[in-house]
Image (spheres, rainbow, N blue to C red):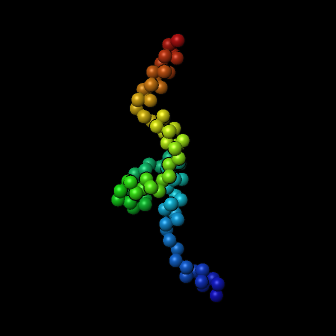
Amino acid sequence: MRLKQVLRKTISPHPFATLLPPLLLEGGADLRAIQAMLGHESIGTTEIYTHIDTSTLRQEILEHHPRNIQYNELQQMDLLTE
């Protein structure tokens, strides 16, 4: 009897929609790919589910911002010429 009660319980996909996106993003998945997986029309909706850690966000900006990339390249060139 207990098993039947458990099996009849409605299972929602919502817990997966809240747990999976941050893990995918941390693992390197593209935000647009996550948006498509979740079936969101707006990227803003997907961003709500990602819960980006501020330290992670800062690191991403430092690594991928065009001006910072140029700065790092110039710094490496200066180190090589010294």
Q: Residue at x 50, y 52 (%)?
A: 51
Residue 73 position within the rendered picture, expressed as x and y whole percent measured from the top left: 46, 24
Q: Residue at x 40, y 32 (%)?
A: 66
Q: Residue furthest right?
A: 2
Q: Residue furthest front?
A: 54
Q: Residue furthest left?
A: 41
Label tally: 0
Quick one: 7 or 55, which is closer to the camera?
A: 55
11 lies above or below 30? below
Task: Decide if residue 11 is on the left or right side of residue 42.
Answer: right
Q: Residue furthest bottom?
A: 1
Q: Residue at x 38, y 54 (%)?
A: 44
Quadrant containing the N terminus in the rendered view: bottom right
Residue 30 position within the rendered picture, expressed as x and y whole percent measured from the top left: 44, 48
11 lies above or below 56? below
Q: Residue at x 60, y 80 (%)?
A: 6
Residue 78 position within the rendered picture, expressed as x and y whole percent measured from the top left: 49, 16
The quadrant where residue 38 appears? bottom left
29 lies above or below 11? above
Residue 81 position within the rendered picture, expressed as x and y whole percent measured from the top left: 50, 13
Quick one: 56 or 34, which is closer to the camera?
A: 56
